[in-house]
Image (cartoon, grey):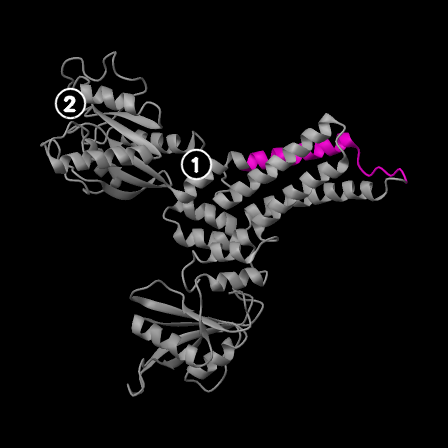
């Protein structure tokens, strides 16, 4: 998987038809391969977009079928992969692009594996592993906030922070090792008190990273929000308002929604999978019972539940039971139909829960506040405008491991009596975890796990 001796080719643009499609060739023979498949007399000049023609007949005997393309040659090491790269921009027909790939394979290239271009960039030192993973995150970004976090990591912000911590840890380890190397001469390159102070400083830096981890992970991975409530309280109306479209059927007949309806929604920059559920009640119809059961299961696994009540009516037995069932989880209680006059005591009675968010899905009153409340509940109150330097679960777990080992080292130093060798072992283990984040220490299984998630062509 990790050989870079051959040249690879793949379509670098998404599947389907478009104005332009790009075929990328990378490897030591990429320039020669491009010269063989392009119908032009002179070789490609470095970093110059060059008009050329290429044969695009998929089968022999189809005739002299050509497409007009623009080819650009990037000599090593000033390319995406650090190798010789040729990018051919053709008309975005799948037939044309497949034919170009087939011609390149006939000329000596090999079809690229998923993520192999970025893998080669990593192996050639053009990207570290943090930046390589950020490439995939940026491609997958569904909201501007996701794209911003991914680009910050691609730009090296997390790499710099981890690198600064690693450099400080390396210096501390070097002083401790020097002290161990000269025990008989009485050299003391660093005192225990200074060691404890410096370890504490590194621990504080890791804790700062981890404080942003929940917010960063929520931004990167998104969340599931389930809209729940008894029939006819306006769940589907709230769902449609948040989704910005009439995805769920809304009628005055209770029980209109019988199955789960899902929509991807941008809520204050968070990618939210919003799910509308069947109204919770004692259903007698077989289909209704299955719909209610699916809603219960969705609620149990949701990151957040929007429990919708009818603000124009008193609380009913179903409302009270749902309030009890959702009390232990993360939820927002929404009082809908604030545009209607309350009958009887209404939801504003003493039996209603505190912190009701009053909205009207019909007029839009309170819906902006509901969006903000969803984002706040999902991120634990952290501002989404703050920097979220760490968002990848792999990175988070490695930082936690380093933090645990450093805390153990700090306790050993401050407690006294622990040999320096044990303190040094904890520090070295912590550094190994930090190096694994950026890929300075890694193995083939990890790289295969990371890059197999990429699309072919990237």
Q: Quadrant of the C terminus?
A: bottom left
Tell me if 214 is positioned left or right of 324 in this view. Answer: right
Tell me if 173 is positioned left or right of 218 in this view. Answer: right
Per the picture, the main secondary structure of the magenta-coloured stretch is helix
How dense is the environment of label 1, judged by Cα within 10 Å: few (below 14), some, or many (20 and up)?
A: some
Is 200 magenta? The answer is: yes
Question: Pointer 2: what residue?
Answer: 340
> Where does residue 171 sit, x and y in percent of width and height?
73, 43
> Dot 2 lies on which element?
loop
> Where does residue 65 sit, x and y in percent of width and height?
31, 83
> Which numbered circle lies on residue 384?
1
The image quadrant that residue 185 belongs to is top right
> Where does residue 4 sit, x and y in percent of width and height?
55, 69
Asked if the residue at tag 2 contacts the one at tag 1, i.e. Cβ–Cβ closer than 8 Å, the answer is no
Q: Which residues are magenta?
A: 185-209
Residue found at x 86% / y 40%:
183
Residue found at x 58% / y 68%:
77
Camera-nearest residue between 268 and 122: 122
How dense is the environment of label 2, judged by Cα within 10 Å: few (below 14), some, or many (20 and up)?
A: few
Is 247 magenta? The answer is: no
The image quadrant that residue 103 belongs to is bottom left
Camera-nearest residue between 74 and 187: 187
């Amino acid at each position: 998987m990790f050989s870079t001796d051959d040249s690879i080719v793949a379509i670098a643009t998404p599947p389907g038809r478009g104005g332009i499609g790009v075929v990328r060739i990378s490897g030591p023979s990429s320039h020669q391969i491009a010269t063989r498949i392009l119908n032009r007399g002179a070789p490609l000049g470095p970093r110059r977009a060059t008009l050329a023609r290429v044969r695009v007949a998929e089968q022999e005997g189809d005739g002299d079928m050509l497409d007009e393309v623009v080819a650009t040659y990037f000599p090593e090491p000033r390319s995406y992969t650090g190798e010789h790269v040729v990018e051919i921009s053709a008309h975005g027909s799948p037939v044309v692009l497949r034919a170009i790939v087939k011609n390149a394979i006939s000329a000596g290239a090999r079809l690229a594996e998923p993520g192999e271009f970025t893998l080669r960039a990593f192996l050639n030192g053009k990207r570290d592993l943090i930046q390589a993973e950020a490439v995939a995150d940026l491609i997958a970004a569904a909201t501007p906030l996701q794209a911003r976090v991914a680009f910050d990591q691609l730009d090296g912000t997390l790499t710099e922070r981890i690198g600064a911590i690693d450099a400080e840890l390396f210096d501390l380890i070097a002083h401790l090792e020097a002290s161990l190397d000269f025990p008989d001469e009485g050299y003391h390159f660093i005192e225990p008190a200074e060691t404890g102070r410096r370890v504490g400083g590194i621990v504080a830096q890791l804790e700062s990273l981890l404080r942003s981890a929940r917010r960063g992970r929520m931004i990167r991975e998104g969340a599931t929000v389930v809209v729940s409530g008894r029939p006819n309280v306006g769940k589907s109306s709230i769902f449609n308002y948040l989704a910005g479209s009439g995805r769920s059927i809304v009628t005055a007949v209770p029980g209109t929604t019988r199955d789960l309806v899902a929509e991807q929604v941008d809520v204050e920059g968070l990618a939210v999978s919003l799910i509308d559920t069947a109204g919770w009640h004692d259903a007698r119809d077989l289909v209704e019972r299955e719909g209610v059961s699916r809603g219960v299961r969705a609620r149990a696994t949701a990151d957040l539940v929007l429990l919708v009540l009818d603000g124009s009516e008193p609380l009913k037995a179903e409302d009270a039971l749902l309030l009890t069932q959702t009390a232990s989880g993360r939820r927002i209680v929404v009082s809908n139909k604030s545009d209607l006059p309350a009958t009887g005591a209404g939801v504003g009675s003493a039996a209603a829960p505190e912190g009701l968010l009053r909205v009207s899905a019909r007029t839009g009153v309170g819906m902006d506040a509901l969006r903000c409340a969803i984002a706040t509940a999902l991120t634990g109150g952290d501002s989404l405008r703050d920097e979220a330097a760490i968002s990848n679960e792999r990175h988070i777990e490695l930082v936690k491991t380093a933090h645990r080992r450093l805390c153990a080292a700090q306790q050993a130093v401050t407690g006294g009596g622990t040999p320096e060798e044990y303190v040094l072992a904890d520090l070295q283990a912590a550094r190994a975890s930090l190096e694994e984040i950026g890929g300075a220490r890694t193995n083939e299984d990890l790289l295969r796990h990371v890059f197999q998630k990429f699309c072919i062509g990237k």
